[in-house]
Image (cartoon, rainbow, N blue to C red):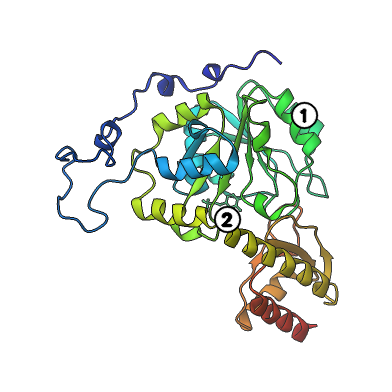
Amino acid sequence: MSVFDINNLVRNNIAQLKAYSSARDEFDQDSEGMVFLDANESPFSNGVNRYPDPQQQKVKALLSKQKGLASNQILLGNGSDEVLDLIFRAFCEPNRDNVVLLPPTYGMYGVLAALNAIAVKEILLTEKFDINLEKTLSAVDKQSKLIFLCSPNNPSGNLLSAQKIRALIENFNGLVVIDEAYIDFSLTQSWLKELDKYPNLIITQTLSKAYGMAGIRLGVCYASKAIIEILNRIKPPYNINKLSQEKAIERLKKVAEVQEEIKRILKERTLLEKALKNISFVENIYPSDANFILVKVDDANERYAQLIEKGIVIRNRTTQVLCKNTLRLTVGTEIENKQLLKALEELN
Ligand SMILES: *Cc1c(COP(=O)(O)O)cnc(C)c1O
């Protein structure tokens, strides 16, 4: 592998782009005693009459402390989906470049590729939903800019092999993006501590799952200072609104509460896994490192419809590759899981 230089990967137009400098980039609201007549805002206070901090410094300061990374290694997006889109736009030239996806996996990677006119090379995961290392490495070509890895993977729930992830990072000249949306439910450590070692690694996380804040839309991207600087230049100036920033700060401070909720989910996941073994039409329960369980049943379409009838909505994954007749069950509260199990038992 040649020496990695991010400047060889970034699109020309992006390399030359001068970021829009917003009023709040030039003077932030915390400059005490200043009169702000620069952004055509309303002067009448109501809590949200001023534009939000475009660099979300308070949110990043908390994340920086908790994750042990510098603030300039963090970029926030309106959900991970925006973060992923920024990565496409920074590094993939429409109608020329391609990205590598390992299905069955999160559907947004493919949607974002299509949206950005980027070709997709799909290399199936193995039967056990792990990386097919040789095939993946031999699929990449000079126009391959990104490999997306989802670990723990959605919809299968398992972690991908760390050894294989490392082999991809070390042998691919483009960027490896590890989507760790579910990492907080895993006892295995995040890849964050490897960031300083690998300049071609990008890690995304989110407040939507373990932090219980899907409604505020806050995704987080961790990478080298150089990568974050590029993404920062192309992000919409005020992409995280003030209410979301405030909510995130409040929540990030409640470390014990978040940990307690994760523990409850893990306990419930174990109970669900056990109980599902007693359901006759459940043929396989896939190991999960996430807050959901993928199960194989006799007839996913029928079971899905029967559960809807009983007022329980789960996700039917039967149309996904390697997922024939599978259903994805999110772990809910103790009461919700009991309702799910009761419904399944009635269908037994
Ligand atoms: C839920 C999920 C996300 C979260 O996306 P947000 O836009 O941050 O809500 C990201 N990746 C995967 C694989 C997910 O399942």
The label shown at residue 255 is: 2
Quarter of the picture containing the C terminus is: bottom right
The type of residue carrying mark 1 is: Ala
> In this view of the protein, can residue 306 be seen by the observer?
no
The type of residue carrying mark 2 is: Val
Q: Is residue 96 left or right of residue 104?
A: left
Identity of the residue furthest to the top in this view: 2
Which residue lies at the image location 80% right of the left edge and 73% below the top edge?
276
The residues bearing labels 2 and 1 have C-alpha atoms spaced at a distance of 34 Å
Residue 328 against residue 105 in the figure, above or below: below
Identity of the residue furthest to the front in this view: 33
**SS label for mark 1:** helix
Q: Nearer the viewer, residue 236 or 220?
A: 220
Q: Is residue 195 left or right of residue 24?
A: right
**SS label for mark 2:** helix
Q: Where is residue 255 shown, x and y percent of the image?
A: 57, 55
Residue 262 against residue 10 in the figure, above or below: below
Q: Nearer the viewer, residue 20 or 247?
A: 247
Compare marks 2 and 1 and give the one earlier in the sequence.
Answer: 1
> In this view of the protein, can residue 273 be seen by the observer?
yes
Which residue lies at the image location 38% right of the left edge and 44% below the top edge?
239
The residue to which callout 1 is attached is: 167
